[in-house]
Every structure is written in structure tokens, then in C-alpha cells.
Amino acid sequence: MALSIEKQSLEAHVDLCAERYEGLKKDLENMSHRMDRMESDMAARMDKLDDGIEEIKQSLSAKENSALKTLIAVGFSAIVGLIGVCGGLLWYIIQHH
């Protein structure tokens, strides 16, 4: 229907093109707003992800420090134990010779 009117009247064609243009313009504006919202949402999610990764790093670092402290304590205890055993053996040897 619109095509036949457009073929007969240039003014009708211009008016219909203006309406079509306005419709396209509104669609593009809506898409632009949606893209802006999506971009904002994505940035917020990335910030949240970065915070989560940083929290995981801190947690792992704390666990590594804790494990290292435990390892040092166990090693120190073993060394002290060995020194005690060596001292006891030395004392035994001195007493029995």
C-alpha cells in the first residue's frame, strides 16, 4: 500500500521516509542506551571479579605464610631434638669412658 502511494506522490514518499528515518533513529538511540547499560554492567562485573581475584591472592598468600611458619617451626623443633640427642649421646660417651 505505502509503495503505491510513494510511486504516485513525491511528498508522500518524503513523509514516509521521514517517518522511517525517525523510527530508525529511535531504534539506534535505544540500542545505544542498551549498549551503555551493558557496558556499565560489564565494568561492574569486571570490578567485582578483580576484587574476588585479589581476595583469593591474599588468602593464598596468608596460607603460604602460615605453611612456611609451620615448616620453620617443625624444622627448628627437629634441629633442637637432634641437638638434644647428640648432647645426650655425648654425655653418655663421656660418662662411660
Image (cartoon, grey):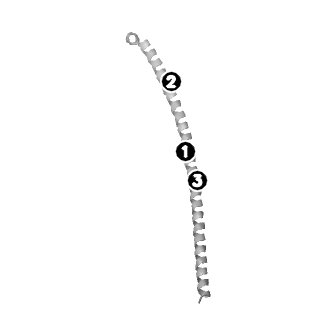
Q: Which image quadrant for residue 86?
A: bottom right
Query: How many other residues sit within 10 Å of disc 1, few (<14), some (14-19) or many (≥20)?
Result: few
To which residue does mark 2 refer? 26
Q: Nearer the viewer, residue 67 or 5?
A: 67
Front-most of 10 and 80? 80
Q: How many marks?
A: 3
Are the two marked residues, 2 and 1, in contact with CB atoms closer than 8 angstroms? no
Residue projecting furthest to the front: 96
Q: What residue sits 56% from the left and 53% below the top? A: 57
Name the kind of residue labelled 3 in the image: Ser
Label 1's element? helix
**Mark 2 or mark 3, whichever is nearer to me:** 3
Vertical placement of 95 versus 34: above or below? below
Res 49 label: 1
Q: Which residue is mark 3?
A: 59
Q: Earlier in the sequence, mark 1 or mark 3?
A: 1
Q: Residue 77: image x %, image y %? A: 60, 70
**At 55% from the left edge and 40% from the top edge, which residue is drawn?**
45
Three-letter code, disc 2: Lys
Query: Relative to 69, is 46 above or below?
Result: above
Work out whether residue 34 or residue 7 is closer to the camera in this orientation and state it: 34
Q: Residue 80 appears at what percent x and percent y?
A: 61, 74
**Tag 3's secondary structure?**
helix
* Residue located at (57% from left, 61% from top): 67
The CA span between labels 2 and 1 is 34 Å
Q: In the picture, which quadrant includes the C terminus?
A: bottom right
